[in-house]
Image: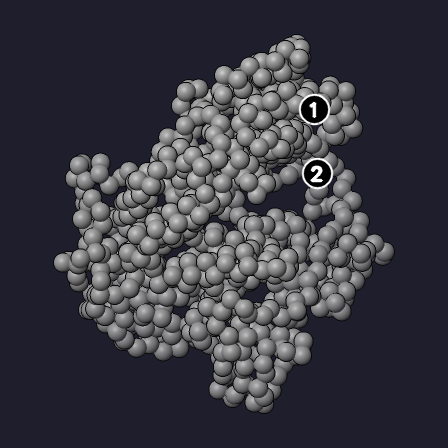
């Protein structure tokens, strides 16, 4: 619906994207449920800095450029660390889609040395939100004027009780009549399934595709959810539309634009020590396409978490669903910089301060840890700092432009150990951005704990979970080499503040009679004989007040097991433990049930063992339940030997850290990837590959595993290999008592269970 005249519309802003030259299409979901398309005049700006004479000469060289609407000289903070504004060239473009090409032209004119181009990384839709101080799903009133759209915001990004319009969602699945073992773009469409109900399976392919377009138009969904839409499904549908001669009529967007996915390749990138593959984005206009296989935040925090991220970070829904958490956080930082008139650099240009060898030794130490006391412990309390590092970044004003600032070298705010000054005259971009996230998450957690309505509790939990990932990422991103407002010195400073706060908390705890059993960065496990819950609560209140970072009492364990290193049985591992709290909540880290590559068969067995132990009220009862737990292993062993385990429960998922052809060793995931490539499938570095062990010790490496997509009737798993995984998972739980995979095998297969029970009783007597 195209509006005319000057009406006022109340509703939620849903989608924004470039339309004609100098215009943005804006979709509003009105209060009465209408989906209204408006257009607004919009011309983005980029900025150029450099030597005064060079920049003035640039004006003459680009004056007649057809992409430029007009230019002007203005005063902005050209660099994040600048304390004063400087004169820069402001260029207004006719079309936001030409920003990248004009930026490259300017850089080339300056031999990539003379000029710095700023704000060129902001996409048109994001810039539009920033300029108008809007955010996705904001409730507002918009007036249609001849000069453009006039907005009156009736919402706030700080709001925690906001309403979301009743969005219409559709799930899209396609059944493919594959001719080979792997689906191919050359295979015809067998049927199309919408919302698990509507099935389009009659007529030829062209008729099926046109019927899909018609049905989508009739249902008029706001969000279309697929699984693999970016990587394969939509490009497949377009290919079939071209073959059928209906590509010009095949439309899934709400805007009447023929469906044409971008002819771009996905990209492989390296982040936090791991290789990732990101499929190219398939954009719909007026609707939002979400690929469930290409989204992190949706899988972690549901749609409520996605909406929270989009609103808080001011990033469009289709972008937020696919963005990494670091990219979402960058969007929030960009907005803060935009409002403070700090230009956003195209490339990070803030160097690390020079350090002597001694300063490097002092500074580069990371977080503080207490080595865990290996074994099982009764009545242990856990206390955690809430968003410790983000809170320290906010409280101490840590950002690229504030650490070692030149405007206030005599600042009283200093980084411990290094004595670096931190600016006290201005608030940094990073702490300004994080302050909102920290405060909102604390409120959501409180509301979740107070909510009596399960649905409301789930909403608040999903929202706080989404914000948690922003806070989890912000510390690492501060030291990331490409973070626009990152700083290695600030990253080091946060660690120093964190160590100081952590040690203070530990010393206070010990002063009040608590023993520290384990501690890692922002969590402490404490024990004090006959300590009441009130004592733990008072401890947290005292530490919070003294340190300035909230310390929360997470609960008390009936028992908790700190596991040893597999290589050194007497040394504890920082993040390998499991236990059951007095509330009945299970908590575990570093076990097979927490690993993504664990087959369901092993996952189920270990989880059942943990549930056996969870009924124990103390370490003595735990020891008496070891025979019962090993009976679980015996049952699962028998299932596997008798062929009662479905082949799907034996599938293992492994990550490809590089291109399959670049592996020098015949590792399992590389073998499975080669099998898929041979069948015509595309496999990239960063993908996960699923397979089943078949003959893991076979000299012919191609027979060792079978890719999950190629499994067929008659495929036999490698029983010996899966039994080894089963025994290892059981041994992991009991390693604090000296169990190994071999001893678990001998106990389950050879040793009499009565003898084992007697052994466990004897162990209990010795412990007593």
Q: For numbered disc 1, what is the local secondary structure?
A: helix
In which image quadrant can residue 340 be found?
A: bottom left
Is residue 110 visible from the viewing direction of this image? no
**Mark 2 residue crowding within 10 angstroms, few (<14) / some (14–19) / many (20+):** some
Closer-to-camera residue (299/388): 388
- Measured from the top left, where is residue 661 in percent x and y? 52, 31
The residue at 67%/10% (across/down) is 752
Residue at the far right: name it: 202
Closer-to-camera residue (30/758): 758
Sequence order check, earlier mark of 1 and 2: 2
User: For mark 1, what is the residue?
Assistant: 636
The residue at 34%/65% (across/down) is 337
> As displayed, is residue 409 above or below residue 603?
below
- Measured from the top left, where is residue 616 in percent x and y? 59, 31
> As displayed, is residue 97 above or below residue 693?
below
- Measured from the top left, where is residue 148 in percent x and y? 50, 83
The residue at 63%/81% (across/down) is 2
- Measured from the top left, where is residue 374 in percent x and y? 44, 25
In which image quadrant can residue 255 be found?
A: bottom right
| 147 horizontally vs 58: left or right | right
Q: In the drawing, what numbered circle is on residue 182?
A: 2
Is residue 467 visible from the viewing direction of this image? yes
In which image quadrant can residue 117 be found?
A: bottom left
């Amino acid at each position: 619906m195209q509006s005319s005249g000057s009406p006022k519309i109340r509703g939620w802003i849903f989608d924004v994207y470039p339309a004609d030259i100098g215009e943005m299409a804006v979709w509003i979901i009105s209060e009465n449920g209408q989906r209204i398309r408006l257009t607004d005049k919009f011309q983005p700006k980029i900025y150029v800095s450099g030597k005064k004479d060079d920049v003035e000469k640039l004006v003459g060289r680009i004056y007649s450029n057809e992409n430029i609407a007009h230019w002007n000289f203005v005063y902005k903070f050209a660099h994040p660390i600048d304390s004063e504004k400087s004169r820069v060239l402001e260029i207004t473009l006719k079309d936001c889609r030409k920003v990248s090409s004009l930026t490259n032209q300017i850089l080339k004119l300056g031999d990539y040395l003379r000029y710095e181009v700023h704000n060129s990384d902001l996409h048109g839709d994001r810039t539009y939100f920033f300029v108008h101080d809007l955010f996705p799903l904001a409730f507002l009133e918009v007036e249609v004027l001849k000069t453009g759209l006039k907005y009156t915001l009736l919402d706030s990004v700080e709001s925690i009780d906001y309403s979301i319009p009743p969005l219409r969602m559709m799930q899209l699945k396609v059944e493919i009549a594959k001719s080979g073992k792997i689906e191919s773009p050359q295979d015809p469409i067998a049927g199309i399934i919408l919302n698990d109900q509507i099935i389009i399976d009659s007529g030829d392919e062209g008729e099926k595709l046109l019927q899909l377009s018609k049905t989508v138009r009739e249902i008029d969904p706001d969000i279309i959810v697929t699984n693999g839409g970016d990587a394969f499904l939509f490009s497949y549908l377009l290919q079939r539309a071209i073959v059928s001669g209906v590509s010009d009529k095949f439309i899934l967007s709400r805007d009447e634009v023929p469906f044409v996915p971008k002819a771009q390749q996905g990209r492989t990138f390296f982040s936090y020590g791991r290789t990732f593959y990101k499929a190219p984005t398939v954009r719909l206009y007026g609707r939002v396409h979400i690929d469930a296989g290409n989204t992190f935040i949706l899988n972690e925090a549901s749609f409520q978490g996605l909406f929270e991220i989009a609103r808080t970070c001011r990033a469009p829904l289709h972008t937020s669903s696919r963005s990494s958490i670091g990219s979402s956080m960058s969007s929030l930082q960009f907005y803060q910089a935009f409002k403070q008139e700090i230009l956003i650099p195209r490339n990070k240009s803030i160097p690390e301060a020079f350090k002597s060898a001694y300063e490097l030794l002092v500074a580069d130490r990371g977080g503080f840890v207490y080595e865990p006391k290996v074994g099982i412990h009764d009545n242990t309390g856990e206390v955690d700092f809430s968003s410790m590092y983000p809170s320290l970044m906010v409280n101490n004003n840590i950002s690229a432009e504030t650490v070692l600032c030149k405007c206030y070298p005599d600042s009283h705010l200093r980084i411990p150990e290094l004595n670096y000054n931190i600016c006290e005259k201005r608030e940094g971009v990073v702490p300004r951005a994080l302050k909102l996230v920290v405060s909102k998450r604390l409120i959501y957690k409180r509301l979740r704990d107070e909510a009596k309505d399960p649905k409301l509790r789930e909403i608040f939990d999903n929202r706080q979970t989404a914000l948690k990932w922003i806070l989890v990422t912000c510390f690492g991103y501060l030291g990331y080499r490409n973070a626009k407002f990152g700083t290695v010195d600030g990253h080091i400073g946060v660690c120093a503040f964190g160590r100081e706060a952590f040690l203070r908390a530990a010393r206070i705890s010990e002063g009040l009679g608590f023993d520290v059993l384990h501690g890692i960065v922002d969590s402490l496990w404490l024990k004090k004989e006959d300590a009441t819950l009130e004592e733990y609560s008072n401890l947290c209140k005292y530490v919070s007040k003294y340190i300035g970072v909230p310390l929360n009492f997470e609960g008390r364990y009936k028992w908790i097991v700190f596991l040893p290193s597999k290589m050194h049985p007497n040394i504890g591992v920082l993040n390998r433990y499991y236990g059951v709290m007095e509330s009945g909540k299970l908590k575990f880290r570093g076990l097979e049930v927490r690993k993504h590559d664990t087959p369901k068969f092993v996952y189920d067995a270990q989880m059942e063992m943990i549930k056996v132990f969870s009924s124990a009220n103390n370490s003595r009862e735990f020891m008496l339940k070891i025979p019962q737990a090993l009976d679980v292993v015996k049952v699962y062993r028998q299932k596997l030997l008798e062929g009662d385990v479905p082949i799907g429960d034996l599938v293992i998922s492994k990550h490809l850290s590089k291109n399959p052809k670049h592996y020098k060793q015949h590792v399992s995931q590389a073998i499975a990837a080669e099998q898929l490539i041979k069948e015509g499938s595309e496999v990239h570095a960063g993908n996960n590959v699923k397979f089943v062990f078949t003959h893991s010790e076979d000299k012919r490496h191609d027979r060792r595993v079978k890719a999950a997509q190629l499994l067929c009737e008659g495929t036999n798993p490698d029983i010996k290999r899966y039994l080894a995984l089963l025994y290892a998972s059981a041994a992991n739980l009991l390693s604090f008592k000296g169990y190994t995979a071999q001893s678990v095998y001998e106990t389950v297969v050879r040793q009499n269970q009565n003898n084992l029970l007697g052994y466990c009783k004897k162990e209990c007597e010795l412990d007593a």
